[in-house]
């Protein structure tokens, strides 16, 4: 997993809960890296899972909720780093529908070894989008957080329903309906 | 600060430092990778530049040295580049005055060139398009254009190139040739017509003389002495020869390639007919070495050809036992025939002369000197050749070729 996902998470934890919480979750997790992360490095996904579990245990907030909040924070990283990329779109549905065939293609050009989820479009209208999320990481809530922010970016909002097709969350249907 | 928070800060600082070092290491590695990549790119860039340079110089050479006029124009016909030959042909130099191909086309052919341009755009090329252009000096030249579209790397048409060949002179010569051919045909017809008329006109006074001489002889029967009678018989012989001469001339003038009709002629039958027609003395043996082929052509002409040669061989036989052999060889497109005799032979200095009209080597009453020239004319109408080998006193072999199919 890309280092920036770790560094941004720890920055957010420090911002919300203080440096003490950062220290706690690192100390409480089994980390091969010893909690040393740089945005340009690459680290095992198991470390992310371990950090999230520790954070959930220490704060009492569910992993799904943590991921969603973190994703909303992460969207701002994209806004700052790749403003031109977002400027290509003028509609949140169009942007989300292009994840698989455009956004992920571009991401792979920058990070050839990135391991990305798939978002298959099942149905699409001007106002709604149904997509099937598949990933061994089961980070669907991270996806939902990014989607919320996407609508916000275009001064819009949406109702997003998630249907878990598999109990472990590796296959989830997103039913996105734009609010009027 | 509590002891705990100091520990936390220390750990955080340690992590940050380690992370910084890690980042530096990674970035250093990336920088090295980038450097290597840049080196590789620079190298391949150099190679590409070299290739481009080579191609450009190659094309430049072609452009400058091509003998025909070469013009590069944009899609509206505006000339972008032209070689020296094009400048020579059109008289314009685009450096001083921009020109459009459509503007220099002859006013009558404006629509034609616009259509040709459309065709070029649709098909990608135009071949042998002939159009009149007006040079800077105001001269009209007929040119032949072969043009094609130049595409960019995305297959989008960007320009057109054309080879412009000046065919004014060529066309002029072609027209002249056409006119000459027509004239020749006409004069040939006239000549044949003339030969007909002349021979007809010549024959009738001959017949009058013939009749008059007869009357004189009848009217003065018993009154002429020996010598006068002999002279009268010489007049008869001369008149006969004269008539034969006229007939032969007429015959000669009517042999042209147009008389060759395309019927299949079995030469064995022709040979058999000749055998029956000719008077063959007992001491001469005429034989055909092998079965003769069939040939496409005019039967009576072919018969005339063989008959003239065989009758010559009979006429000029001086041996106690005369031999005349007819043979042939298949040479692919042609048949080569030979007629061999053991007669008096022909001296080398006469080998050419005998084929010319009115050239008889012997003062023979049967010979008018036309026979072999007719033979030659017939052979030539079959795109063949005729020649001979001969030794005086030993005999002669005439060879000739005939094309199997015309």
Image (cartoon, coloured by chain):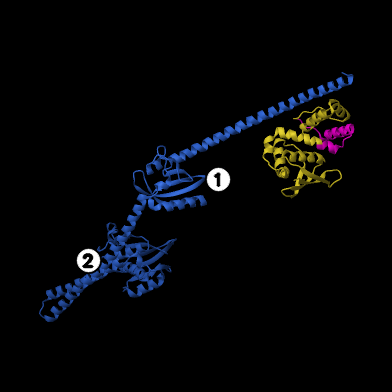
Chain colours: A yellow, B blue
Q: Is residue B74 left or right of A30 when viewed as pictured?
A: left
Marked residue nearer the N-terminal end (2 or 1): 1
Are discs 2 and 1 both within one chain? yes
**Where does residue B89 sit, x and y in percent of width and height?**
38, 44
**Where does residue B216 sit, x and y in percent of width and height?**
13, 78
- What's the chain of the residue with tag 2? B
Q: Is residue B381 left or right of B152 when viewed as pictured?
A: left
Instruction: Describe the element under mark 2 as helix, strand or loop.
Output: loop
Residue B85 occupies which quadrant of the picture? top left
Q: CA distance from mark 2 to mark 1?
A: 86 Å
Residue B237 occupies which quadrant of the picture? bottom left
Q: Is residue B381 above or below residue B8?
A: below
Q: Which residues are magenta?
A: A41-68
Q: Is residue B331 a member of the stretch shown in magenta?
A: no
Residue for badge 2: B363
Q: Tell me what residue is drawn at x 40 percent, y 52 percent.
A: B109
Q: Is residue B312 left or right of B51 when viewed as pictured?
A: left
**Where does residue A71 sit, x and y in percent of width and height?**
79, 36
Residue for badge 1: B156
- What's the chain of the residue with tag 1? B
**Where does residue B78 sit, x and y in percent of width and height?**
45, 43
């Amino acid at each position: 997993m890309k280092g920036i996902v770790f560094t941004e998470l720890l920055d957010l934890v420090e911002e919300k809960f203080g440096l003490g919480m950062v220290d706690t979750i690192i100390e409480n997790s089994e980390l091969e890296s010893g909690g040393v992360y740089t945005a340009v490095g690459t680290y095992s996904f198991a470390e992310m899972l371990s950090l999230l579990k520790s954070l959930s245990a220490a704060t009492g907030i569910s992993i799904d909720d943590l991921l969603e909040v973190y994703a909303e924070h992460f969207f701002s990283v994209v806004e700052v780093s790749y403003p031109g990329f977002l400027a290509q779109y003028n509609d949140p549905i169009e942007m989300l529908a292009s994840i698989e065939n455009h956004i992920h293609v571009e991401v792979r050009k920058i990070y050839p070894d990135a391991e990305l989820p798939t978002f298959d479009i099942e149905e699409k209208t001007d106002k709604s989008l149904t997509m099937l999320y598949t990933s061994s990481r089961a980070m669907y809530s991270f996806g939902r957080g990014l989607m919320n922010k996407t609508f916000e970016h275009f001064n819009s909002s949406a109702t997003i329903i998630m249907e878990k097709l598999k109990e472990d969350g590796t296959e989830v249907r997103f039913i996105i309906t734009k609010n009027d | 600060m509590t002891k705990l928070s100091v520990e936390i800060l220390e750990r955080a600082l340690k992590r940050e430092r380690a992370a910084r070092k890690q980042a530096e290491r990674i970035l250093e590695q990336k920088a090295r990778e980038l450097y290597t990549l840049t080196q590789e790119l620079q190298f391949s860039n150099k190679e590409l530049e070299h290739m481009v340079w080579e191609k450009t110089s190659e094309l430049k050479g072609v452009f400058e040295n091509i003998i025909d006029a070469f013009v590069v124009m944009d899609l509206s016909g505006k000339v972008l580049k032209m070689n020296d030959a094009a400048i020579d042909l059109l008289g314009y130099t685009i450096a001083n005055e921009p020109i459009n191909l459509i503007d220099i086309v002859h006013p009558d052919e404006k629509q034609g060139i616009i259509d040709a341009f459309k065709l070029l755009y649709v098909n990608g090329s135009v071949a042998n398009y002939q159009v009149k252009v007006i040079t800077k000096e105001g001269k009209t030249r007929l040119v032949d254009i072969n043009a094609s579209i130049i595409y960019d790397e995305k297959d989008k048409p960007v320009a057109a190139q054309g080879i412009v060949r000046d065919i004014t002179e060529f066309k002029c010569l072609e027209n002249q040739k056409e006119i000459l051919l027509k004239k020749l045909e006409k004069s040939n017809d006239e000549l044949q017509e003339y030969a007909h008329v002349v021979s007809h006109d010549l024959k009738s006074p001959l017949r009058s003389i013939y009749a008059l001489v007869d009357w004189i002889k009848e009217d003065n029967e018993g009154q002429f002495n020996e010598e006068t009678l002999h002279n009268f018989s010489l007049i008869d012989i001369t008149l006969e020869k004269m008539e034969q001469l006229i007939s032969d001339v007429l015959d000669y003038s009517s042999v042209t390639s147009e008389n060759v009709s395309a019927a299949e002629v079995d030469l064995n039958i022709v040979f058999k007919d000749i055998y029956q027609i000719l008077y063959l003395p007992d001491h001469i043996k005429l034989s055909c070495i092998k079965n003769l082929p069939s040939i496409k052509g005019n039967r009576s002409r072919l018969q005339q050809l063989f008959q003239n040669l065989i009758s010559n061989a009979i006429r000029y036989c001086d041996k106690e036992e005369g031999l005349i052999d007819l043979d042939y060889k298949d040479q692919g497109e042609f048949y080569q025939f030979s007629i061999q005799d053991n007669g008096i032979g022909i001296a080398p200095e006469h080998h050419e002369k005998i084929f010319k009209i009115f050239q008889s080597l012997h003062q023979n009453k049967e010979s008018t000197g036309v026979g072999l020239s007719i033979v030659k004319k017939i052979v030539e109408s079959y795109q063949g050749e005729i020649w001979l080998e001969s030794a005086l006193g030993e005999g002669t072999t005439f060879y000739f070729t005939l094309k199997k199919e015309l």
